[in-house]
Image (cartoon, rainbow, N blue to C red):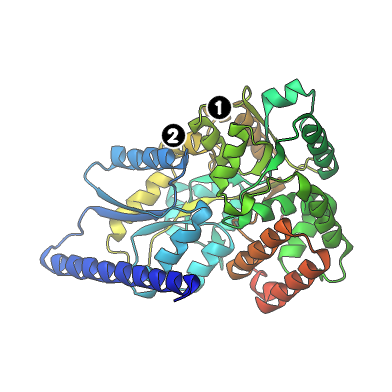
Amino acid sequence: MRGAARTSVVVLVLIAVIVAAALGYVAGTRRMSSQQPTEARRLEIFHWWTAGGEREAADAMLKAFKDKYPDVEVVENPVAGGGGVSHRVVLQARLSAGVPPDTWQTLGGAELKSYVDGGNLVPLDELFTELKLADAIPKPLANAVTINGHPYVVPLNMHIQNILYYNQKLFAELKLQPPTTVDELITVAKAIKAAKPNMSPLGLGSKEKWGAAFVLDSILLELGGPEYYVRLYKGEVDVKTDATYKAALEKLRDLAPYIYQFHAGLTWDESVGLVVSGDSAMVIMGTWAIGYFKSRNWTPGTDFGAVTFPQKPDRILLFHPDTYGIAKGAPHARTAMDWLRVVGSQELQVPTDVTQGGLFARLDIDPAKFPDPIRQELQNYVRSNPGKLILDQHGSIAPFSFTQAYWDVIAAFTAKPDVAGTINKVAELFTTFKVKEEAAWYTWP
């Protein structure tokens, strides 16, 4: 049996085992519930926070819940994989079998929409009214968790995607300023390569594919601007004839020689680790990288700095939220609702977001709660400029099926740049996944 076939069989067997175990668990729970007049105080939660900084944040999140509801038994099912790549496979097996967990981590935007369209989540209009969440979170965030006029999940944070982190001590040594445009990035990369021939100036991890798309997104945002970015991922741009998309790929091709060569084997946290180890000087990653740096004992503002990238011609923040909702048919729906009440509170968001690296979803939390100047500045900027937020590659304006295929194409381009071939592939993806139709739900600003 070939390796790929063997892997497929193993995956199918694992999923079958998971589903069988889940069916047995639910059957047992239902037998017990027939004997009990009240719902058991139990919460089953799926999430993917397992990397450095994330696991600690998950602990802080669940502690906040247990402090409020100490009588609840929490059953975790963490599935490793940056951004939930593996998590979604296991979760979908449960949902397809009709045995959902009570709640699971999902991103706002098109990923959320896929669960809503599949009939997997219940609307939360009454809870949003009870918690006055519409008054506490920025409008673009509210839009990202609202599908067909109804909120379906409670956001616990906001992650900013387009941040360039850099080794602050190295930049001081080489008398370099952090780049704010792609041309400045290439110039800085050349200077670093000249001074440190054994260093790859820009770190990257494309094992989970999406890291390469992050880099291209920053270039697209600079060359096209925010309106163009939204139109592109709503399927309103013909990339076959579009000069901006071609120019962005050409810039990424020019940057490719300065990117860490073995990126295809690295996860997101390992790409950030390249900066810590001295293999790279910079990395483009979301706010969650702050938690990883801190887990490696790197201090923001001393060991590493950060700038949103690009900052010209306008400073736009590409964002997505981590969120939780309630499964339709959740075994412990009342407890899950208590969970969401805590998710939306300052008591959970402060310890969780400070630890993991995101911004607060609630704008009424003092930015000074963050111990680092990077997020204090970002949170203040969002409070004053909520209209500068646009859904990113993780939250996804386009349907998630398109996004996953798109990640593959851009990751392949980064390894072996082919401008014309990539344009043709991307154009085909926009058609195959009916992006213009499926992304019509998203509005900006």
* Residue occupied by mark 2: 351
In space, the residues marked 2 and 1 are separated at their CA atoms by 19 Å
Residue 337 in the image: state x and y as whole percent.
Answer: 35, 54
Residue type for callout 2: Pro
Q: Between disc 2 and disc 1, whose residue precedes?
A: 1
Where on the picture, by quarter, is residue 332? bottom left
Residue placed at 60% from the left, 27% from the top? 300
Q: Please provide percent x and percent y for residue 307.
A: 71, 35
Q: Which residue is mark 1?
A: 298
Residue 351 in the figure: left or right of residue 189: left
Which quadrant of the view contains residue 420?
bottom right
Residue at 56% across / 35% down in the picture?
Answer: 290
Q: Residue 323, relative to residue 399: is it above or below?
A: above
| Figure check: 79 above or below 113 | above
Is residue 52 shown above or below 12? above
Q: Residues within 10 Å of mark 1 (few under 14, many from 20)?
A: some
Q: Quadrant of residue 399?
A: bottom right
Q: Which of label 2 and label 1 is nearer to you?
A: 1
Disc 2: CA contacts within 10 A as few (<14), some (14-19) or many (>=20): many
Residue under the image location 35 percent in, 38 percent down: 64
Numbered-mark total: 2
Residue 172 at x, y = what percent? 74, 22
> Is any part of residue 22 visible from this angle?
yes
Q: Nearer the viewer, residue 137 or 117?
A: 117
Instruction: Tell me the kind of residue under disc 1.
Output: Trp
Viewport quadrant of the C terminus: bottom right
Work out whether residue 393 or residue 41 is closer to the camera in this orientation and state it.
393
Secondary structure category for the residue under label 2:
helix
